Image: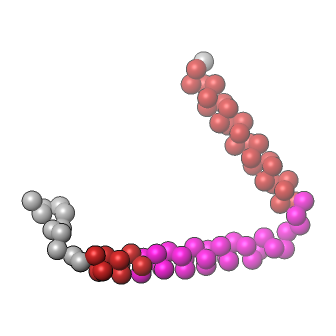
Amino acid sequence: MGLFWKTGNRRAADVDQVAEKLAFRLLKLQQGLADRINHPLRKVNLPVLVTVLVALGTAFGIYCFYLVLSAFF
């Protein structure tokens, strides 16, 4: 019944080629996004970045702790 799924007549080489193209495009997209994010962050001082990271981590931890406690009480 090939109503929703294609039949298995594709060769493994074709599937590997499609997977390779998809992986290359995703890797290129990931690298471009990382470059766009890292470029402005290079101008920020390290202590400021550490402070923001600690503040966000603490806020996320407190929220997770709140969710766990609210599930039981």
Q: Is residue 24 above or below residue 6?
A: below
Up-down relation of residue 9 to residue 57 (above or below): below
Check the image and name the residue furthest to the front: 12
- Which quadrant would residue 21 be assigned to in this image? bottom left
Q: Residue at x 58, y 20 (%)?
A: 72
Quadrant of the snapshot with the N terminus: bottom left
Q: Where is residue 45 drawn, in percent x and y?
A: 89, 66
| Residue 73: quarter of image | top right
Q: Is residue 11 magenta?
A: no
- Magenta region, main secondary structure: helix
The residue lying at 65 percent from left, 36 percent from top is 64
Locate residue 40, reporting x and y percent.
77, 74
Q: Is residue 3 left or right of residue 61?
A: left
Residue at the (55%, 80%) spot, across then down: 28
29 to 62, vertically: above or below: below
Left-right relation of 36 to 48: left
Rendering coords of residue 36 (x, y %) = 67, 76
The answer to whether residue 40 is magenta is: yes
Bounds of the magenta span? 21-47
**Tell me, what colour scheme is on the image?**
secondary structure
Quarter of the image where one finds residue 52: bottom right
Residue at (38% x, 75% y) in the render: 19
